[in-house]
Image (cartoon, helix red, strand yellow):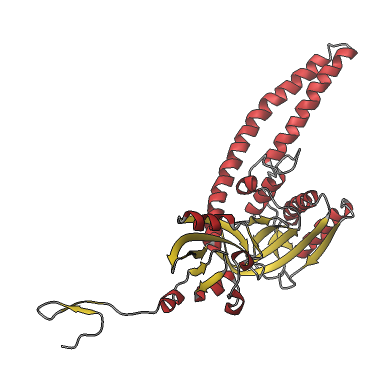
Amino acid sequence: MMVREGEAVTESGQQTAQTMAFEPQQLSDLLNTAVLVLNQELQLCFFNAACSQVLAISEKRLSGQRFPELFQYCELGKEPLLRALQQQTSFAISDVQTILHDGHPTLLDLYLTPFEHQDHWYLLLEIRQIERQRKISQENVQQHQHHAARELVRNLAHEIKNPLGGLRGAAQLLESSLSDEQKEYTQLIIAQADRLRKLVDRLLGPYRPPQQQYANLHQVIERVYQLAQLDNPAAIHFQRDYDPSIPVFRFDPELIEQALLNIVRNAQQALEQGGQILLQSRILYQHTLHGQRHKLVAAIKVIDDGPGIPTDIRDTLFYPMVSGKVGGSGLGLTIAQTLLHQHGGWIDCDSWPGHTEFTLYLPISDTEEPL
């Protein structure tokens, strides 16, 4: 009986197990997870083949790089990595927002493990890209939360409107029996009741179903651009980048215009010190929205170079009454999301300092232009 290297046999001569010798580099190159090793200066001393794909950097450029240089932007600073080396403790960091060198925003999960080799300490990093899975999961969660919040707001708004109408009517009846000096108080009650009524109507949002028709999406974007230019500080410059391959398809131009205008207005208000806003359109193929795959989806991007959205409101950005602006009502994005939902679409947001990107997704169900 011939026994290969690493095989074990019993006394009866039967083979029970087999071990084989592998090179660590060979094994690590088979992984889909990026594995890299940093020294105490956070300089890259080892990486596997998946690093180039996950980080969108060629292997030649990876050699000798320091960790902060692996990204255009990374919200994870070097302090946690140095702390892991100093304290010699392993830990994981989830949902790290980064911008790769190709300009693509993505979320990463990082696992940090310090180890000692030849009297020196190194840091082993395992990096997994979770952007696509996270987007789908986040979309599903936000969809349920959006529906729940909308239902709560609608019920609350109806409960407010009924007594509000009675309050206003009582003030009008009382006004007829008061002197001119006293009427100013009833006028104040009526004015405040009207203000609350308008707020409730905005909370309820558009109540009519979409009036879908064949329309050109770029004509809608151009109208929004023209409206934004009418009330635009001179320090804000617009750029447009349209995809001519987007066909004429069925949607409600008025509702999509309102949703897009709400987002553009927010971008203008965020650029208090001036800046640039890019209006961009693209066609997406085989894109999933609300768990359903669509052959064609139109994507409208509104990108500004402002300070970014505060981290404490990013997860609740589309909730009613949530706003990053002083004195803001927090209804513009909620209404915009509702309007896209009525079309089977979705609004997504990526933001970091110097870059905020809202994307409106509209499924294209019929690509034929009417005769």
In x, y percent, where is residue 25?
A: 44, 77
Quadrant position of the N terminus in the picture = bottom left
In x, y percent, where is residue 52?
A: 56, 74
Is 305 located above or below residue 196 in the figure? below
- Whether residue 318 appears in this view of the structure is no
Taking the spot 45% from the left edge, 55% from the top edge, the residue there is 89
In x, y percent, where is residue 196?
A: 74, 30
- Whether residue 269 appears in this view of the structure is yes
**Can you name the residue that lies furthest to the left here?**
12
Q: Is residue 25 left or right of residue 143?
A: left
- State which quadrant residue 8 falls in: bottom left
Q: Is residue 314 left or right of residue 277?
A: left
- Which one is in front, 349 or 39? 39
Quadrant position of the C terminus in the picture = bottom right
Q: Is residue 370 left or right of residue 314?
A: right
- Which one is in front, 17 or 23? 23
In x, y percent, where is residue 269?
A: 79, 48
**Can you name the residue that lies furthest to the bottom here?**
2
